[in-house]
Image (tube, rainbow, N blue to C red):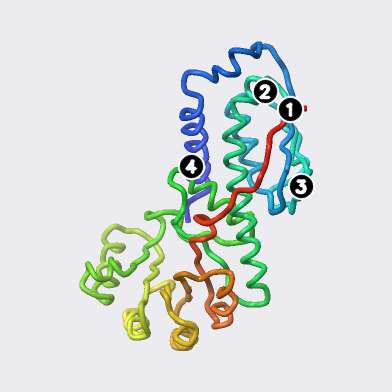
Amino acid sequence: MISEQQFKEELRLIIANAIREDVGDGDHSSLACIPPTAQGKAKLLIKDEGVLAGVEFAKQVFAYVDKDLEVETLLKDGATVSHGDIAFYVSGSSLSILTAERLVLNAMQRMSAIATKTQSFVALLKGTRTKILDTRKTTPGIRALEKWAVKIGGGENHRFALYDMIMLKDNHIDFAGGITQAIEKTKAYLKRENKDLKIIVEARDLDEVAEILASGGVYRILLDNFNYAQTKEAVALIGDQCLTESSGGINAETLRKYAECGVDYISSGALTHSVHNLDLSLKAV
């Protein structure tokens, strides 16, 4: 996974680009009718039910826009919330609060939705050994926020991007000439480039699982679109030689059954690409 410093830099870039995109040469709606010396206070109002996420990110946004804005936190990331709850108050320059408003709401609404969905999946896995993973199926430009939200919801992050883990999927395997060739070329590449990256290899059937195991040196095998019987057989075949991951169209209805097959992880793109934003508002008080 990426380092803490890399993650912080991702957040900084997200904020800077979002403010650039939204503000341009000025928030003329606010500038036109609010004096630059005006002071105000607003509350983050919850108008929905779910898991709150993005409070700490909101603080970073407010600080970026205006270091003199003050935030009084009432609810932390990961809190279970319902209609009428107040997450925080922010006070200071009215113009600064308005400048930050849309980015704060956009981020928190989506992050809260992802955290809520993730928590529901974690609950379905309770009592099993299986953990839920996100994927790279994230909104371009805000991956750090969406993966942060998965962690807040109790899930775990898969690789962050293409650079922090090796993942040999079907196209890599086919372009490389087969599983054995792909794995051996990867090992040679890592040695040549002096890189220490974990290797995950996708298997499409049990024969491919056996071929991956024969090659060795693999951190995790991804069982792609296996049915329950095939998954159980694959888990038995793999044993403790490496970790296992199920993926491919797994949803809330099938999640528990795949977990009961004994896999270590289940990855789900739906955690980040199929959520309905929580309803939040920033209201003047």
Which residue type does callout 4 highlight? Answer: Glu
- Give the CA separation, mark 4 to mark 2: 23 Å
Q: Which numbered tag is attached to residue 83?
A: 3
- Give the CA separation, mark 1 to mark 3: 17 Å
Q: Which mark is in front, 1 or 4?
A: 1
Which residue is rendered at x = 59% and y = 54% of the image?
114
Q: From the viewer's perspective, is 5 left or right of 185?
A: right
Q: Which numbered tag is attached to residue 284?
A: 1
In this view, the residue in front, 202 or 250, is 250
Q: Earlier in the sequence, mark 3 or mark 2?
A: 2
Q: Earlier in the sequence, mark 4 or mark 3?
A: 4
Q: Where is 173 relative to 73, above or below?
A: below
Crowd class of label 3 (few under 14; some 14 to 19; many from 20; radius 10 Å): few
- Give the CA separation, mark 3 to mark 2: 30 Å
Crowd class of label 1 (few under 14; some 14 to 19; many from 20; radius 10 Å): some
* Horizontal and vertical percent position of residue 76: 72, 46
Crowd class of label 4 (few under 14; some 14 to 19; many from 20; radius 10 Å): some
Which residue type does callout 2 highlight? Answer: Asp
Q: Are marks 1 and 3 in contact (CB under 8 Å)?
A: no
Q: Earlier in the sequence, mark 1 or mark 3?
A: 3
User: Mark 4 sits on what residue?
Assistant: 10
- Give the CA separation, mark 4 to mark 3: 32 Å
Q: From the viewer's perspective, is 185 left or right of 168?
A: left
User: Mark 2 sits on what residue?
Assistant: 68
Q: Quadrant of the C terminus?
A: top right
Q: Which numbered tag is attached to residue 56?
A: none
Which residue type does callout 3 highlight? Answer: His
